[in-house]
Image: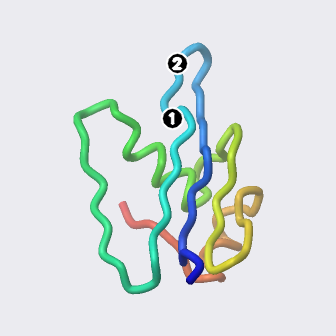
Amino acid sequence: MNPFLEIKQVSKSFGGFTALDGVSIAIASGERFGLIGPNGSGKTTLINCVSGSLRNDSGSIVFDGEDVSRLPAYQRTRRGTARSF
């Protein structure tokens, strides 16, 4: 079975600061997934990349079998992924 959300080798930097460095996660449909870590560990940056609020520098984000890595946030929302603040 293919993952419903697959994050493959996602990296994101801000200037000289690397917030995400090759993050990979696979989440199955119906699975509950928790993302924990200390302040500054990249949790919000990862969620922002998945939702399209930020564009990842490298790697890919596959949602329901479709690579959404380069889609803007509003198109990702139409496909069923979003975030709240």
Q: Quadrant of the C terminus?
A: bottom left
Colour treatment of the image: rainbow
Mark 1 sits on what residue? Answer: 20
The three-letter amino acid code for the residue at tag 2 is Phe
Residue 3 appears in which quarter of the rendering? bottom right
The three-letter amino acid code for the residue at tag 1 is Leu
The x, y position of residue 58, in whole percent, is 70, 40
The residue sitting at 62% across, 73% down in the picture is 63
Above or below for 66 versus 18: below
Label 1 vs label 2, nearer the camera:
1
Which SS class for mark 1? strand
Above or below for 67 versus 19: below
Mark 2 sits on what residue? Answer: 17
Q: Quadrant of the N terminus?
A: bottom right
Task: Check the image and name the residue furthest to the top.
Answer: 16
Which SS class for mark 2? strand
The x, y position of residue 60, in whole percent, is 68, 54
The residue sitting at 60% across, 37% down in the picture is 11
- Residue situated in front as seen by the camera: 54 or 1: 1
> Marks 1 and 2, Cα distance to the nearest angstrom?
9 Å
Disc 1 packing (10 Å; few <14; some 14–19; many ≥20): many
Name the side, left or right, on which 39 lies relative to 26.
Answer: left
Residue 34 appears in which quarter of the rendering? bottom left
Name the side, left or right, on which 26 lies relative to 55.
Answer: left
The x, y position of residue 47, in whole percent, is 46, 54
The x, y position of residue 36, in whole percent, is 25, 49
